[in-house]
């Protein structure tokens, strides 16, 4: 039997869960580095996912607490997509992924963890990044600390 130690996960397990919306609360705080906010636009902001599917997993969310994509106004949707382009560019320059998954999980059945606030996921991908760990042990191996990924990507924004 081999063990994979991930002691940094204990912080999340023991952390008190907030009742509010993280996409509403985090922009109000003036702690961008601690919250992994990479960029603040006029209508949307870019943030690292603190429980990522892959290294460099970015989310883009509007400041407005809106749950449906079709309810976003033209300025917000334009900035959302512009920040998607910018995020892809930064990720390509800084961590050189070979591909991307881009999307939004809308509604519980659609896999949304935060149901009431629309947000876009950008997940960098590399050949072979899906291996046996998630399949047989429900474990994802992350090759870099979030703080290091933040410092690397922040400079690009």
Image (tube, helix red, strand yellow):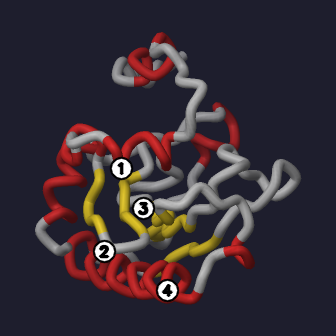
Secondary structure under badge 1? helix
Tell us which disc is closer to us: 4 or 2.
Answer: 4
Tell us which disc is closer to us: 3 or 2.
Answer: 3
The disc, 4 or 2, on the residue closer to the chain's N-terminal end is: 4
Nearer to me, 79 or 120: 79
Secondary structure under badge 3? strand
Tell us which disc is closer to us: 3 or 1.
Answer: 1
CB atoms of marks 3 and 2 within 8 Å: yes
**Image position of 7 with respect to 35: above or below:** above
Label 3 to label 2, Cα distance in Å? 9 Å
Nearer to me, 8 or 19: 19
| Crowd tier of the residue under label 4, counting other residues whose Cα lies within 10 Å: few below 14, some 14–19, many 20 or above | few
Look at 49% across and 63% down and name the residue there.
Answer: 61
Label 4 to label 2, Cα distance in Å? 24 Å
Label 3 to label 1, Cα distance in Å? 15 Å
| Crowd tier of the residue under label 3, counting other residues whose Cα lies within 10 Å: few below 14, some 14–19, many 20 or above | many
Identify the residue under disc 1: 27
Look at 77% across and 52% down and name the residue there.
Answer: 111
């Amino acid at each position: 039997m081999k063990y994979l130690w991930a002691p940094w996960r204990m912080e999340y397990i023991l952390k008190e869960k907030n009742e509010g919306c993280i996409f509403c609360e985090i922009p109000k705080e003036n702690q961008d580095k601690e919250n992994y906010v990479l960029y603040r636009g006029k209508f949307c902001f870019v943030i690292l996912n603190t429980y990522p599917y892959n290294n460099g997993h970015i989310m883009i969310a509007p400041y407005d607490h809106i749950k449906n994509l079709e309810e976003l106004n033209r300025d917000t949707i334009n900035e959302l997509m512009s920040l998607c382009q910018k995020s892809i560019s930064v990720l390509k320059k800084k961590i050189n992924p070979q591909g991307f998954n881009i999307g939004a999980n809308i509604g519980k059945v659609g896999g949304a963890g935060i149901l009431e606030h629309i947000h876009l996921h950008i997940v960098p991908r590399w050949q072979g990044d899906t291996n046996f760990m998630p399949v047989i042990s429900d474990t994802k191996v992350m090759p870099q600390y979030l703080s290091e990924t933040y410092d690397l990507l922040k400079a690009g924004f």
